[in-house]
Image (cartoon, rainbow, N blue to C red):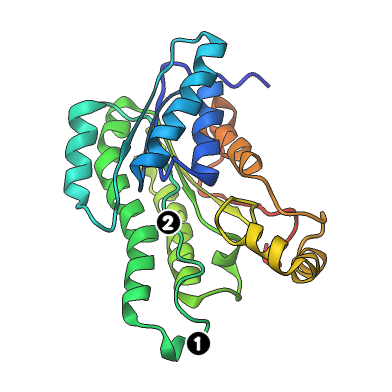
Amino acid sequence: MDINLSNKTALVTGGSHGIGKSIAKSLLEHNCNVIFFGRTKKNVDETIKDLSKDLSKRNTKNTVNGFQFDILQSSIKDLEERIKLEFGLIDILINNVGGGGRWGDSDILVTDDEVWNQVYYKNFIIAKDLIKILLPSMLKNEWGRVITITSSLAKQAGGRPWFNVAKMSQTVLMKNLAKNSLYSSKGVTFNSVAPGAIDIPDTGWDEMKKINPKKYKEFIKSNSPIGRLGKPEEVANVVTFLCSQYASLVNGASIAVDGGESSSY
Protein backbone atom coordinates (compact mmCIF):
# COMPACT_ATOMS: atom_id res chain seq x y z
CA MET A 1 0.00 0.00 0.00
CA ASP A 2 1.64 3.18 -1.23
CA ILE A 3 0.54 6.07 0.97
CA ASN A 4 1.53 9.37 -0.61
CA LEU A 5 0.68 12.61 1.18
CA SER A 6 2.67 14.93 -1.07
CA ASN A 7 1.24 18.44 -1.38
CA LYS A 8 -0.54 17.99 1.97
CA THR A 9 0.31 19.88 5.14
CA ALA A 10 -0.41 18.57 8.62
CA LEU A 11 -0.51 20.29 11.99
CA VAL A 12 0.43 17.92 14.82
CA THR A 13 -0.29 19.31 18.27
CA GLY A 14 2.03 18.10 21.00
CA GLY A 15 4.36 16.87 18.28
CA SER A 16 7.69 17.12 20.08
CA HIS A 17 7.42 14.00 22.22
CA GLY A 18 6.00 10.48 22.36
CA ILE A 19 3.07 9.65 20.10
CA GLY A 20 3.00 13.12 18.55
CA LYS A 21 6.64 12.94 17.51
CA SER A 22 6.11 9.50 16.00
CA ILE A 23 3.10 10.78 14.06
CA ALA A 24 5.12 13.70 12.71
CA LYS A 25 7.91 11.32 11.66
CA SER A 26 5.49 8.92 9.94
CA LEU A 27 3.73 11.69 8.02
CA LEU A 28 7.07 13.07 6.84
CA GLU A 29 8.06 9.60 5.65
CA HIS A 30 4.95 9.64 3.46
CA ASN A 31 5.85 13.00 1.85
CA CYS A 32 3.59 15.22 3.98
CA ASN A 33 4.68 18.68 5.10
CA VAL A 34 4.53 18.80 8.88
CA ILE A 35 4.05 21.63 11.35
CA PHE A 36 4.05 20.86 15.05
CA PHE A 37 4.23 22.59 18.39
CA GLY A 38 5.42 21.46 21.78
CA ARG A 39 5.44 22.73 25.33
CA THR A 40 9.20 23.19 25.76
CA LYS A 41 11.70 24.81 23.41
CA LYS A 42 14.24 22.09 24.21
CA ASN A 43 11.98 19.28 22.99
CA VAL A 44 10.91 21.28 19.94
CA ASP A 45 14.52 21.99 18.93
CA GLU A 46 15.54 18.36 19.43
CA THR A 47 12.58 17.12 17.40
CA ILE A 48 13.28 19.51 14.52
CA LYS A 49 16.89 18.31 14.50
CA ASP A 50 15.87 14.63 14.50
CA LEU A 51 13.19 14.98 11.85
CA SER A 52 15.31 17.21 9.63
CA LYS A 53 18.05 14.58 9.73
CA ASP A 54 15.54 11.98 8.54
CA LEU A 55 14.44 14.27 5.71
CA SER A 56 18.00 14.92 4.52
CA LYS A 57 18.65 11.17 4.31
CA ARG A 58 15.58 10.70 2.12
CA ASN A 59 16.31 13.75 -0.06
CA THR A 60 12.66 14.77 -0.39
CA LYS A 61 11.05 18.16 -0.93
CA ASN A 62 8.60 18.09 1.99
CA THR A 63 9.35 20.21 5.05
CA VAL A 64 9.08 20.23 8.83
CA ASN A 65 8.50 23.28 11.03
CA GLY A 66 8.07 23.40 14.79
CA PHE A 67 7.57 26.02 17.46
CA GLN A 68 7.22 26.26 21.22
CA PHE A 69 3.69 26.79 22.51
CA ASP A 70 2.27 26.00 25.95
CA ILE A 71 -1.50 25.75 25.69
CA LEU A 72 -1.98 26.36 29.42
CA GLN A 73 0.12 29.53 29.35
CA SER A 74 -0.91 31.10 26.02
CA SER A 75 -4.17 31.92 24.29
CA ILE A 76 -5.74 30.02 21.42
CA LYS A 77 -5.98 33.36 19.60
CA ASP A 78 -2.19 33.64 19.61
CA LEU A 79 -1.96 30.16 18.14
CA GLU A 80 -4.54 30.95 15.46
CA GLU A 81 -2.69 34.09 14.36
CA ARG A 82 0.63 32.28 14.16
CA ILE A 83 -0.78 29.42 12.09
CA LYS A 84 -2.52 31.74 9.62
CA LEU A 85 0.40 34.16 9.27
CA GLU A 86 3.22 31.65 8.98
CA PHE A 87 1.76 28.47 7.50
CA GLY A 88 -1.41 29.11 5.49
CA LEU A 89 -3.54 26.13 4.44
CA ILE A 90 -3.60 23.13 6.78
CA ASP A 91 -5.02 19.97 5.20
CA ILE A 92 -4.63 17.62 8.16
CA LEU A 93 -5.18 18.32 11.86
CA ILE A 94 -3.85 15.83 14.40
CA ASN A 95 -5.22 16.67 17.84
CA ASN A 96 -2.60 14.93 19.93
CA VAL A 97 -1.92 17.39 22.74
CA GLY A 98 -3.64 16.47 25.97
CA GLY A 99 -2.76 14.22 28.87
CA GLY A 100 -3.55 14.57 32.54
CA GLY A 101 -4.24 10.90 33.07
CA ARG A 102 -2.00 10.84 36.12
CA TRP A 103 -2.94 14.24 37.53
CA GLY A 104 -4.71 14.61 40.86
CA ASP A 105 -5.58 11.81 43.22
CA SER A 106 -7.60 8.69 42.52
CA ASP A 107 -10.04 9.99 45.14
CA ILE A 108 -12.37 12.56 43.58
CA LEU A 109 -13.07 14.09 47.01
CA VAL A 110 -9.50 15.30 47.46
CA THR A 111 -8.83 16.45 43.90
CA ASP A 112 -9.17 20.16 43.22
CA ASP A 113 -11.58 21.38 40.53
CA GLU A 114 -8.65 23.01 38.76
CA VAL A 115 -7.44 19.53 37.75
CA TRP A 116 -10.82 18.81 36.12
CA ASN A 117 -10.75 22.18 34.33
CA GLN A 118 -7.18 21.94 33.05
CA VAL A 119 -7.48 18.35 31.82
CA TYR A 120 -10.74 19.14 30.02
CA TYR A 121 -9.23 22.29 28.51
CA LYS A 122 -6.03 20.57 27.35
CA ASN A 123 -7.85 17.66 25.76
CA PHE A 124 -11.28 18.79 24.60
CA ILE A 125 -11.39 22.59 24.37
CA ILE A 126 -8.12 22.93 22.46
CA ALA A 127 -9.18 20.22 20.00
CA LYS A 128 -12.57 21.88 19.50
CA ASP A 129 -11.04 25.34 19.02
CA LEU A 130 -8.47 24.15 16.48
CA ILE A 131 -11.17 22.40 14.48
CA LYS A 132 -13.17 25.64 14.36
CA ILE A 133 -10.06 27.51 13.17
CA LEU A 134 -8.99 25.05 10.46
CA LEU A 135 -12.23 23.49 9.23
CA PRO A 136 -13.37 26.44 7.03
CA SER A 137 -10.26 26.21 4.83
CA MET A 138 -10.61 22.41 4.58
CA LEU A 139 -14.21 22.82 3.40
CA LYS A 140 -13.17 25.46 0.88
CA ASN A 141 -10.46 23.15 -0.42
CA GLU A 142 -12.90 20.19 -0.40
CA TRP A 143 -10.47 17.89 1.39
CA GLY A 144 -9.37 17.44 4.97
CA ARG A 145 -8.56 15.03 7.74
CA VAL A 146 -9.19 15.61 11.45
CA ILE A 147 -7.81 12.90 13.71
CA THR A 148 -7.95 13.14 17.48
CA ILE A 149 -5.83 11.00 19.78
CA THR A 150 -8.09 9.87 22.60
CA SER A 151 -7.55 6.86 24.88
CA SER A 152 -8.82 3.35 25.46
CA LEU A 153 -10.11 4.79 28.76
CA ALA A 154 -12.56 6.97 26.83
CA LYS A 155 -15.02 4.08 26.62
CA GLN A 156 -14.57 2.27 29.91
CA ALA A 157 -14.06 2.72 33.62
CA GLY A 158 -10.60 2.93 35.12
CA GLY A 159 -8.09 5.70 35.47
CA ARG A 160 -8.77 9.23 36.65
CA PRO A 161 -12.42 10.26 35.99
CA TRP A 162 -11.51 13.74 34.65
CA PHE A 163 -9.29 12.10 32.04
CA ASN A 164 -12.00 9.61 31.01
CA VAL A 165 -14.55 12.41 30.68
CA ALA A 166 -12.25 14.59 28.56
CA LYS A 167 -11.30 11.72 26.25
CA MET A 168 -14.89 10.57 25.84
CA SER A 169 -15.85 14.14 24.95
CA GLN A 170 -13.24 14.11 22.19
CA THR A 171 -14.55 10.80 20.86
CA VAL A 172 -18.15 12.02 20.79
CA LEU A 173 -17.09 15.26 19.08
CA MET A 174 -15.44 13.33 16.23
CA LYS A 175 -18.50 11.13 15.75
CA ASN A 176 -20.84 14.10 15.85
CA LEU A 177 -18.86 16.08 13.27
CA ALA A 178 -18.62 13.03 11.00
CA LYS A 179 -22.42 12.81 10.92
CA ASN A 180 -22.65 16.35 9.51
CA SER A 181 -23.16 15.92 5.77
CA LEU A 182 -22.20 19.56 5.14
CA TYR A 183 -18.67 18.62 6.22
CA SER A 184 -18.32 15.03 5.10
CA SER A 185 -19.72 15.66 1.61
CA LYS A 186 -16.85 18.11 1.13
CA GLY A 187 -14.24 15.40 1.62
CA VAL A 188 -13.45 16.15 5.27
CA THR A 189 -13.37 13.15 7.62
CA PHE A 190 -13.25 13.03 11.42
CA ASN A 191 -11.87 10.05 13.34
CA SER A 192 -10.35 9.24 16.69
CA VAL A 193 -7.54 6.87 17.58
CA ALA A 194 -7.62 5.38 21.07
CA PRO A 195 -4.24 4.12 22.32
CA GLY A 196 -3.91 1.84 25.28
CA ALA A 197 -0.79 1.67 27.44
CA ILE A 198 2.03 3.02 25.27
CA ASP A 199 5.71 2.89 26.24
CA ILE A 200 6.61 6.58 26.13
CA PRO A 201 9.73 7.92 27.91
CA ASP A 202 9.13 10.03 31.03
CA THR A 203 5.52 8.93 31.50
CA GLY A 204 6.06 6.57 34.42
CA TRP A 205 6.64 3.23 32.71
CA ASP A 206 10.45 3.49 32.85
CA GLU A 207 10.27 4.33 36.54
CA MET A 208 7.95 1.41 37.27
CA LYS A 209 10.25 -1.01 35.43
CA LYS A 210 13.22 0.09 37.55
CA ILE A 211 11.60 0.62 40.95
CA ASN A 212 8.98 -2.10 40.94
CA PRO A 213 9.62 -4.61 38.13
CA LYS A 214 7.27 -7.12 39.75
CA LYS A 215 4.37 -4.64 39.61
CA TYR A 216 5.23 -3.84 36.00
CA LYS A 217 5.20 -7.51 35.00
CA GLU A 218 1.91 -8.06 36.82
CA PHE A 219 0.36 -5.11 34.96
CA ILE A 220 1.47 -6.47 31.60
CA LYS A 221 0.24 -9.96 32.43
CA SER A 222 -3.20 -8.82 33.59
CA ASN A 223 -3.81 -6.04 31.05
CA SER A 224 -2.03 -6.82 27.79
CA PRO A 225 -3.09 -9.87 25.75
CA ILE A 226 -0.05 -9.37 23.51
CA GLY A 227 2.29 -9.36 26.51
CA ARG A 228 3.84 -5.91 26.12
CA LEU A 229 3.21 -2.20 26.00
CA GLY A 230 2.45 -0.53 22.70
CA LYS A 231 4.95 1.59 20.80
CA PRO A 232 4.31 5.19 19.68
CA GLU A 233 5.07 4.28 16.07
CA GLU A 234 2.29 1.67 16.14
CA VAL A 235 -0.20 4.44 16.89
CA ALA A 236 1.41 6.64 14.23
CA ASN A 237 0.94 3.95 11.57
CA VAL A 238 -2.83 3.95 12.12
CA VAL A 239 -2.98 7.75 12.06
CA THR A 240 -1.05 7.88 8.80
CA PHE A 241 -3.44 5.41 7.20
CA LEU A 242 -6.42 7.55 8.27
CA CYS A 243 -4.78 10.55 6.60
CA SER A 244 -4.39 8.69 3.32
CA GLN A 245 -6.48 8.24 0.20
CA TYR A 246 -7.19 4.66 1.30
CA ALA A 247 -9.24 5.82 4.30
CA SER A 248 -11.75 7.97 2.41
CA LEU A 249 -14.71 5.89 3.67
CA VAL A 250 -13.50 5.81 7.28
CA ASN A 251 -15.42 8.60 8.99
CA GLY A 252 -16.62 8.84 12.59
CA ALA A 253 -14.61 5.80 13.67
CA SER A 254 -12.90 5.34 17.02
CA ILE A 255 -10.05 2.91 16.46
CA ALA A 256 -8.50 1.15 19.44
CA VAL A 257 -4.74 0.70 19.19
CA ASP A 258 -4.13 -1.20 22.39
CA GLY A 259 -3.27 -4.81 21.61
CA GLY A 260 -6.67 -5.98 22.89
CA GLU A 261 -6.29 -4.25 26.26
CA SER A 262 -9.67 -2.49 26.35
CA SER A 263 -12.87 -4.34 27.17
CA SER A 264 -15.17 -2.06 25.15
CA TYR A 265 -16.08 -2.49 21.50
Residue appearing at x 28%, y 58% in the figure: 72
Horizontal and vertical percent for residue 249? 56, 36
Please state which of residues 68 and 24 is positioned toward the viewer in this rendering.
68
Q: Point out the image quarter for the C terminus.
A: bottom right
Q: Is residue 257 above or below residue 15?
A: below
Is residue 121 visible in the rendered structure shown here? yes
- Name the residue at the front extreme: 211
Marks 1 and 2, how far apart in space?
Answer: 21 Å
Residue occupying the point 30% across, 39% down: 135
Left or right relative to 3: residue 177:
left
Residue at the image point whose x is 64% and y is 18% from the top:
2
Identify which residue is drawn at 56% across, 22% down.
29
Q: Is residue 77 left or right of residue 174?
A: left
Q: Which amino acid lies under the numbered mark 2 shown in the image of this protein?
A: Gly
Q: Position of residue 20 (x, y in %)?
A: 49, 42
Query: Is residue 262 visible to the viewer in this orientation of the structure?
Result: no
81 sits to left or right of 11: left
Label number found at residue 98:
2
Q: Identify the mark nearer the N-term, 1 or 2.
A: 2
| SS of the residue under disc 1 | loop
State the mark number for residue 107. 1
